Image (cartoon, rainbow, N blue to C red):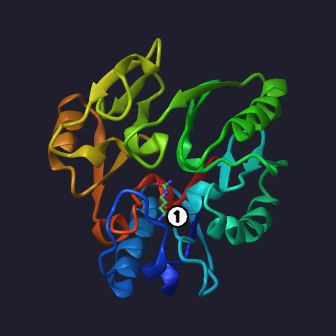
Amino acid sequence: MIAITREVSPAITRCELTHLERTAIDVDVARAQHAAYERLLERLGCAVHRLPADPDMADSVFIEDTAIVLDEVAVITRPGARSRHVETPAVVEALRPHRTLARIVDPGTIDGGDVIVAGRQVFVGRSGRTNDAGIRQLRSILAPIGRSVVAVEVRGCLHLKSAATTVDNGTMLINPEWVPPGTFPGFEVIEIDPREPSAANVLRVGGSIVCAAASPRTQDILDQRGYQVAAVEVSELAKAEGAVTCCSLVFRK
Ligand code: CIR
């Protein structure tokens, strides 16, 4: 597996914020947490390739939003926040050796954080960042390779993946406050512990589930169901509304 990550910019203190009040972010702490996250990905079997960031790319570390990497194609997104458009050119160059590329173009917008790939189905959140034009474009890019795109409403959180992620091919971990349990027909659903609203954002790497250290009760739920859980501290990145999926693009070589 390859994991592409991107440096924490000193400008992270001016990051986009939608649901959180701005609080001071310690860039050194954010960088240390990011480095520990990268080491965890390496331990789980990824070759980590970290891209540099320009000092003005406030949200560069949240590289997930810039691309959707599938076995057949990588779709370069057009992020919903205009300040983030500067992030995509370097991601194009980083993915070019690995995949055929496709692109979301104006007037479409998609943040990768709104995209859940679950087998041949691709669920896409219609959110403050992802619009109908973007969803339509993604549908026409993926239809010829036999992948269907299902649009899902997102309310109360930034991205679809704030509310739900897969923990295996047939199971979704969800926060039912943000996404109704019936949203994913045919999938088994595990609900997070309600005291940990952000806990549904987990990252599958190999056979492990990477969770934020701030969600110990949800980790227990997963552990009891037999999942291999690996926790990582991302509290400083969480002040910028980041979580564990958004800090990497993980894909098969
Ligand atoms: C933003 O608002 O764009 C960033 N501050 C946070 C992006 C987090 N991305 C993600 O969870 N996929």
Relative vertical location of residue 41 with respect to residue 168 in this rendering, above or below: below
Residue 143: horizontal and vertical position, in percent?
79, 25
x, y percent for residue 235:
28, 67
Q: Which residue is mark 1?
A: 62
Q: In front here: 23 or 49? A: 23
Quarter of image, res 242: bottom left
Q: Is residue 160 left or right of residue 212?
A: right
Of the pair 9 and 136, the residue shown nearer to us: 136
Secondary structure found at label 1: loop
> Where's residue 37, x and y in %?
40, 66
Judge whether residue 214 can be spotted in this image.
yes
Task: Identify which residue is drawn at 41% across, 72% down.
Answer: 34
Q: Amino acid at mark 1?
A: Phe
Task: Specify few, some or many for label 1: CA neighbours under 10 Å numbering under 14, 14-19, or 20 or more.
Answer: many
Looking at the picture, tell me which residue is in the foreground, 65 or 132.
Answer: 132
Q: Is residue 207 left or right of residue 199?
A: right
Q: Is residue 2 visible?
A: no
Q: How many marks?
A: 1
Q: Quadrant of residue 249?
A: bottom right
- Residue found 72% across the figure and 55% down from its top: 78
